Amino acid sequence: MSGRARLALTAAAATLMASCALLPLVSPMTWLFQAAFLVAVQTGVGAAARRVPLARPLTVAAQALVTLLTLTVAFAREHAIAGVIPGPDTFRYFGDLLQQGSDDVSRYAIPAPLTPGIRLMVVGGVLVVGLVVDTLAVTFRSAAPAGLPLLALYSVAAGLSDGPTDWLWFLVAAAGYLMLLLAEGRDRLSQWGRVFGGAARTPGAQESGAVAPVRTGRRIGFAVLSVALFVPLAMPSIQGGLLDGTGAGVGVGNGNGGTISAVNPLVSLRDSLNVDEDRQVLSVRTSSDDVSDLYLRIVSLDDFDGTTWKPAQRHITSVPNTFPTPAGLGGDVRRTTVKSTISAADWYAQDWLPMPYPPSGVKVAGTWRYEPVGMTLVGDHGQNTRGETYQVTSLDVQPTAEQLAAAPDASAAMRKEYTKVPSSLPSVVAQTAKEVTAGSANHYEEAVKLQDYFAVTGGFQYDTQVEVGRGEGAIANFLKQKRGFCVHFSFAMAAMARTLGIPARVAVGFAPGTPQADGTVSVGLKDAHAWPELYFEGVGWTRFEPTPTRGTTPSYTVSDTPGSSLPDETLPSKGASAAPSVSASQSESCPAQLRRQDACASPSAAAAVQSGDDGPPWWQLALWALGGLAVVAVPLSPMLYRQQARARRLGAYDRTPAGVAAHTLAVWTELTDTAWDFGILPDDSQTPRNAAARIVRLGGLDPAAGASVHRVADAVEQVLYAPRPRPTAGLADDVRRVTAAFNGTVGVPSRLRALFAPRSAVRAVWAASARWTRLRERAAAARPTLHKPSEQEG
């Protein structure tokens, strides 16, 4: 392998090693494998362009073009011409993905889920850094400045992560940069010959190049890494060093348990619900007589973009002594004042303050800010809940079903902001909402029917192992599969309520905890929860509970039986068909209480949903298949061309004198191309006999293979110079024998190079260029004839 190729591989490896610093930021780590493959393609294009050779700017342009094409195939093939060529729609889609990724970065806590936008940002960023590193270190032979993009890549990750293994990623990134410097230094020193070479270790051994300087460089690099890694440990006064484990970020802090972070409801909720040990997050002492309704709300998600719910950007102010009356709450609605003292665990670092809703006053130490629309408190300048004890005065609002049913329409401003759904929302969401709520007289009845559909009558099952699901079809998929946890139920009900014109949002926090013997309530990780809040004029934002087996059903959603936690079982199934069922219904075969506890058998999602997904159209599948074939065939095209050419040249031929002559010349071409593939450039200025001697000498061939080369050369001379050439048998076998000899004299890299990237494959480009030239000449020759006026015309 040449020094330039070795340097290119080292540059690619250094880029991927530095990108490992991003692993703690995003989960899962599958993006790294995709980035590694695309960086390999990028590096291969650069190596091929330098081998031709192309001018340096053209080499960089070729790599940038291939990088754009690979990103198009990987992320935007549906928006590209023929699935490969980027067009205006492709760049618009890239812009939308990058905007989505930027929003996701600001929304999610670490580790963020691998959304399409984040994937494009991470993989695209690694490719851009890889292109810059390859350009500086390999194309322009200056490895030292290539450390700047590597440092930028590592710094982005180090600035966002505060995990205990940050030192490891620093070590990996620094080792990659040192490898790059050593590879460039070795390549430069080797050009000076043996002056800088180390002495041979054994008598008679050949000197191996720049051994001593490289060994010295490795020692220096190891010493530098040791100093950078261990000096912060020996000097406690240095804060924020590589091994500093203190974290002032959002959410997770330094503990071993997960937290429910408002900026990451999708991932943190599921992680919290699936922990093996239900650690206590909060301890609550309250004046309320009924703790079964004590929900602790962290934040509201009121911005729905069709992909997910997220907090809208709001202005924050200083914390008032007394909070204003909640929006929409009228004076005729019954309410009582509740006082609660809440203590957070010393490992729970949440930057939003969990409180009962609606709060009317908070006493808390530290620097907190107030967000008026959601009536929430958010920490300022790194303030969080770790170890905090605070007092909250809140209202226990107790509307009646009659008040909710008689609620007038919400204001135009409220409807405009909280009933907005994107056009990309699948139509099945609104259609299902209409079917479930058919026959309702008002928005309250619609809301109750939606809640009952998810919690009791719809056949949904609570399952925390289901993936959260992202994208425009996530809610539609949940309605088909009918399995999920609180995120699925709350998101789906809020979206369906909006399609019916009911202002809706999603709240994230904790469901009621477990009462303790000392009168407190213990709230654990597994109490993490999400629920929908619907707005009714005169009552305000009102909680509903669509998730089966979680929380408590609000009393104002139960008809005819006040105080019950179950809907009225005498009502017909919501959205039920008038046709008779082929089997006993769930309500007939299972008591209501068991059904509420999810103890009844129910059909699986596969059995409950019979309507299959038609999937993408055939032409789209065909384009995907063609794109996949192109991705595989393009890198393998040189090998395929050489195999086809070899089979044609060494195959059957006409036994006439002309056929024998053509076959002999084709065999000679195959022999010289095989030598070319193994690094022996053809020299057309030499006679066949001299060319054969040169191939045997430079290839180090054994006597048998050398005799085969000379036998082919003699046959060529017969064809070229003899008045009556004598045909020679077995020429194809001679070429095969020479090929096997070449494979036995070179190393594995050279064999792989000759197989997958044969140099002689450039003949295909030359042949195409010659054909194009002939076509142009024919067109130029025909043009005057086509347009020449007749001489007989007067």
Image (cartoon, rainbow, N blue to C red):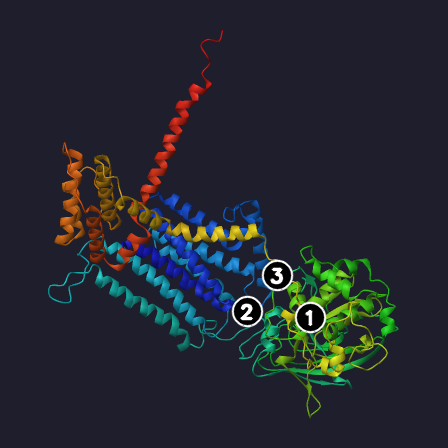
Cα separation between marks 1 and 3:
16 Å
163 vs 462, left or right, is left
* Residue denoted by label 3: 471
692 vs 747, left or right, is left
Q: Residues within 10 Å of mark 3 (few under 14, many from 20)?
A: some
Residue 497: percent from left, percent from top? 75, 64
Taking the spot 69% from the left edge, 65% from the top edge, the residue there is 316
Q: Which amino acid does label 1 sit on?
A: Phe
* Residue denoted by label 1: 489
Q: How crowded is mark 1: few (under 14 residues within 10 Å), some or many (20 or more)?
A: many
Would you say residue 691 is visible in this rendering? no
The local secondary structure at tag 1 comes to: helix
Q: Which amino acid does label 2 sit on?
A: Ile
Taking the spot 17% from the left edge, 50% from the top edge, the residue there is 698
Q: In this view, does 364 lie above or below 101?
A: below
N-term mark: 2 or 3: 2
Query: Contact, CB < 8 Å: mark 2 with mark 3?
Result: no
